[in-house]
Image: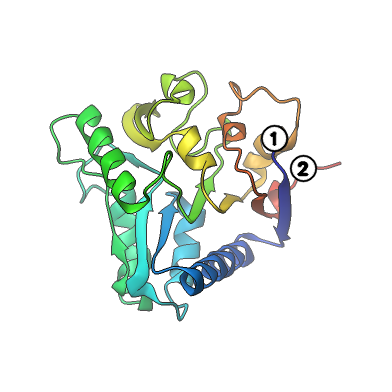
Amino acid sequence: MTHYRIQRSPDKAALAQAAATAMAAVIRGTTTRQLRCVVALAGGSTPEAAYGHLGQEDLPWKRVELVLGDERWVDAQDPASNARMVRRCLLSGSRAHRAHLHPVPTHMPSPEAGAMAYGDLLQTLCPGQPPQLDLVLLGLGDDGHTASLFPGTAAVDVKDRWVTVGWGKDLPRISMTAPLLSAARQVIILVAGAAKRQALQRLLDTDEDPARTPARLVAPKGEVLVLCDQAALPVD
């Protein structure tokens, strides 16, 4: 059974700072034990604010490899691109500019080809079956999705690949699969706003069906750190 440790912040601004602090601690600890730290980043407005703080942290950024937990199948310069957001919010004009970002290859002929290529890249960065990421930052949708594992889609059931093609909000997406996300050494889930309160309550419910709340499929051996603001915290 997955153990969730909840850390509450009073508001979104404090939550963004708490997320940056937690991520920096994992990166710092990992790079004292090994040469590189591989971090999977999430998209969304709350992670975006956290990346602004994270980029100011004094870390061995040259030894940090950044990958994406999911990506919309759009051009790298499209405003909807997670890679574009990471470059703008984390890598531009900050200490973190020395980190190495590995974007999803959305220039390839098809989403399927992009997913296969990204899976191969992750296997190279993190040898193992499955590859073991050092840190994964995830969001939580109000429908219970995480990464691009949306309820009722085929991506939720993929267990024989590390990366798959998903579909959400009228766009094809490339997403890490539940087995890959679950293999991470540390998982942090970031949840903000009253609209996410019910989804968070479902995530924490041991009787909840993962088919309805795919975020429950992310089940690492260690605890999952859930960072939320007061508005998202379920009422007892």
Judged left or right of residue 174, residue 150 is: right
Q: Which residue is mark 2?
A: 234
Residue 115 falls left or right of residue 190: left
Secondary structure of the residue carrying tag 2 is loop
Badge 1 is on which residue?
198
Measured along the vertical axis of the image, is residue 108 above or below residue 28? above
User: Type of residue at label 2?
Assistant: Pro
Asked whether residue 230 is in view, the answer is no
Q: Residue furthest front?
A: 128
State the image coordinates of residue 187 (x, y, percent, origin top left): 57, 50
In which image quadrant can residue 86 be found? bottom left
Relative to 42, residue 31 above or below? below
Residue 128 on image: x %, y %: 41, 44
Q: Quadrant of residue 164?
A: top left
What distance separates the C-alpha of mark 1 from that of mark 2? 7 Å
Residue 154 in the figure: left or right of residue 145: left
Q: Quadrant of the C terminus?
A: top right
Tell me the kind of residue under disc 1. Gln
For the point 73% across and 52% down, the residue is 5
Q: Nearer the viewer, residue 102 or 127?
A: 127
User: Which residue appears at 32% of the width and 73% of the height?
Assistant: 62
Q: Please, which colouring scheme is shown? A: rainbow
Q: Are marks 1 and 2 in contact (CB under 8 Å)?
A: yes
**In-front residue for pair 32/216:** 32
Specify whether residue 55 is in view: yes
